Amino acid sequence: MQHGNPPETLVNQFCSSVPADKIGPLGFAPCLAQHGYTQLTRYQPASRFWRFQWIEGSWLLALAALLIVATIWLVDRRAALCVTPCGRTATGGSDSQGDRA
């Protein structure tokens, strides 16, 4: 589906008779308007561009920080659930062969 076109199921249901040379937003709009559908497009003024960038950047940064904290918490929790400490066998010795001599 291309940007600006109605969903394919809606087109197939109401506007299957639109000729191939009329395919696109301008070809489907009159057909869908006959069935009570309209399209509303709103634009934001250019003066709000940086405000929107800061808002979006802020929540994405907050989400990233939250995911980092959750990852650290889960890794620490998993490490705390180990039955034996990392690198140690059940008898308390080391796994490496260098410590046995």
Image (spheres, helix red, strand yellow):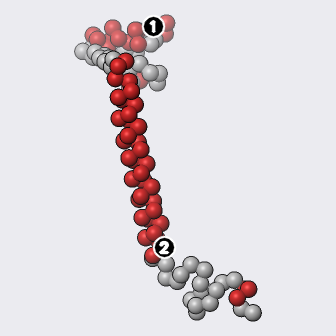
Identify the residue shown where x is 42% and y is 64%.
73
* Relative image position of residue 37 (x, y in whole percent): 27, 16
Q: Quadrant of residue 27?
A: top left
Name which residue type carries label 1.
Lys
Question: Which numbered circle lies on residue 79?
Answer: 2
From the viewer's side, name the closer residue of 26 and 71.
71
Please say if 99 is above or below 8: below
Q: Secondary structure at mark 2?
A: helix
Percent across and percent down for residue 68 are 45, 55
Which mark is in front, 2 or 1? 2
In the rendered image, the vertical position of residue 97 relative to residue 64, given as above or below: below
Residue 22, numbered circle: 1
Q: Residue at x 45, y 76 (%)?
A: 81
On the image, the x and y values in percent for residue 33 come to 28, 11
Neighbour tally class for label 2: few under 14, some 14-19, many 20 plus, Cα within 10 Å? few
Judge whether residue 56 can be spotted in this image. Answer: yes
Q: For the residue labelled by badge 1, is the local secondary structure a helix, a strand or a loop?
A: helix
